[in-house]
Image (cartoon, rainbow, N blue to C red):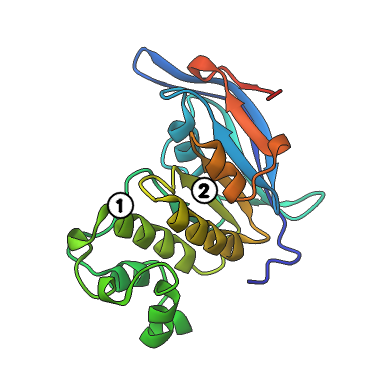
Amino acid sequence: MNRENRNVRVILSEISKSYGEKQVLTGIEAVLASPERYGLVGRSGCGKTTLLRLLLSLEKPDAGVVEWRLGEGQAERLQPHPLIGAVFQEDRLCEGLSALENAALVIPRDRELFQNRALLRRELLRLLPEDALEKPVARLSGGQRRRAAIARAMCAPEPLAYLMDEPLTGLDRQTKEEVTAYIREKTEGALFLVATHEAEDMELLGVRQEHILRLRPGGRGFEKLS
């Protein structure tokens, strides 16, 4: 996938978010830019998922600004954000549809991958067995559903960024190695951010130590890893 000259960055400026009386994030500041690969870590409940939702414009911050920009210097501002390939904690698949049909939902109808189902089948076969492609995803195993959700995100047309929330949950070591090799290939050149509790997953996904962001307890900004 060619993303040359398509530099994208997201600027987080003094981001705060609460739900009722519960303060989830406070004073979050960061600049993330392609083609780097970032990891987001922290204790359960510290605001990792909330931060990803803010980046996806699924939530609005109570204070501060999430700003996506394309290009260098006086870069074009992207409203609300560029096309993003997303994998959520939940699989968020349409239960009555097959893995093939779920993947087709994110592909524009004028794209070859949508029009040529043989091509789409070959893409999904990289993560799923043949007998898992046609049956409703409600009948798939947990690991197969997870792989179907990842494959769907990878089928979106040329995202400039990928955000993933615990994408490898429920996968064994061998499957993780196969899936992460696929993810790294498909996301090369894009801005990549993954939230996970597993250091092994960071390594498999190619996140370097200096690009790991640890949220402080209570979501009070980031701390540096030693």
Residue 111: percent from left, percent from top: 47, 81
The residue sitting at 36% across, 68% down in the picture is 128
| Residue that extends furthest to the right in the rendered view of this protein | 73
Residue 44: percent from left, percent from top: 42, 25
Depth check, front residue: 31 or 170? 170
Dot 2 or dot 1: first in sequence order is 1
- Residue 213 sits in quarter: top right
Residue type pointed to by label 2: Leu
Q: Which structural element holds mark 1?
A: loop
The residue sitting at 30% across, 57% down in the picture is 145
Residue type pointed to by label 1: Arg
Residue placed under numbered mark 1 in the picture? 92
- Residue 4 sits in quarter: bottom right
Q: Residues within 10 Å of mark 2 (few under 14, many from 20)?
A: many
Residue 136: percent from left, percent from top: 19, 67
Residue 24: percent from left, percent from top: 45, 20
Depth check, front residue: 153 or 63? 153
Residue placed under numbered mark 2 in the picture? 163
**Separation of disc 2 and disc 1 at Cα?**
15 Å
Q: Is residue 158 above or below residue 10?
A: below
Q: Quadrant of the N terminus?
A: bottom right
Q: Does residue 60 show up?
A: no
The residue sitting at 69% across, 52% down in the picture is 34
Q: Is residue 148 above or below residue 81?
A: below
